[in-house]
Image (cartoon, rainbow, N blue to C red):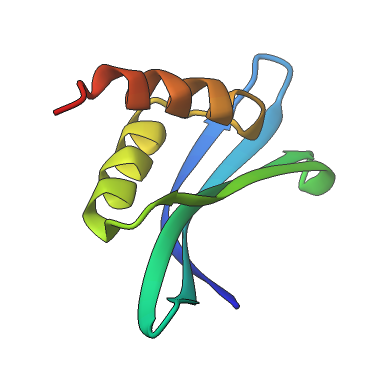
């Protein structure tokens, strides 16, 4: 079972009057690895467009299992929020972020 936690929102508007709301969620999934219980963390972004107060479109994308470290997932979400990343570009941006981290 996946539990969702809203970590932040971002509101933007376009030149033609569309309002865009971006919602960023931390996803937490508990599973078993043999005899051990373990959690994995992922990210979901929901983009809601409205025009003159009416919802006209919703987009969403998620990555269920990004890391086993909650703090790493939260750091990535904060980067996504600060740069207003949308669902369509999320996987590309996360790949770039993960490539920035050198292997030990």
Residue 2 placement (x, y as % from top left): 57, 72
In this view, the residue farthest toward the top is 15
Indicate whether 26 appears above or below 87.
below
In this view, the residue farthest toward the front is 34
**Residue 2 falls left or right of residue 40:** right
In this view of the protein, can residue 97 be seen by the observer?
A: yes
Residue drawn at 46 percent across, 23 percent down: 95
Residue drawn at 40 percent across, 33 percent down: 80
The N terminus: image quadrant: bottom right
Residue drawn at 83 percent across, 48 percent down: 54
Indicate whether 6 appears above or below 97.
below
Which of the two residues, 40 or 76, is positioned nearer the viewer here?
Answer: 40
The C terminus: image quadrant: top left
Residue 37 placement (x, y as % from top left): 38, 81
**Residue 11 falls left or right of residue 78:** right
Residue drawn at 32 percent across, 33 percent down: 79
Within the image, what quadrant is residue 87 found in?
top right
Residue 21 placement (x, y as % from top left): 59, 42
Which of the two residues, 78 or 72, is positioned nearer the viewer here?
Answer: 72
Residue 63 placement (x, y as % from top left): 57, 46
Which of the two residues, 15 or 49, is positioned nearer the viewer here?
Answer: 49
In this view of the protein, can residue 46 be seen by the observer?
A: no
**Residue 99 falls left or right of residue 88:** left
In this view, the residue farthest toward the left is 104
């Amino acid at each position: 079972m996946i539990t969702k936690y809203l970590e932040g929102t971002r509101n933007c508007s376009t030149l033609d009057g569309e309002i865009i709301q971006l919602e960023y969620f931390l996803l937490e999934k508990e599973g078993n690895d043999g005899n051990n219980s373990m959690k994995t963390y992922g990210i979901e972004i929901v983009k809601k467009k409205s025009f003159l107060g009416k919802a006209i479109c919703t987009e969403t994308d998620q990555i269920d299992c990004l890391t086993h470290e909650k703090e790493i997932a939260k750091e990535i979400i904060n980067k996504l929020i600060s740069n207003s990343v949308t669902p369509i570009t999320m996987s590309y941006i996360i790949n770039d972020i993960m490539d920035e981290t050198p292997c030990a």
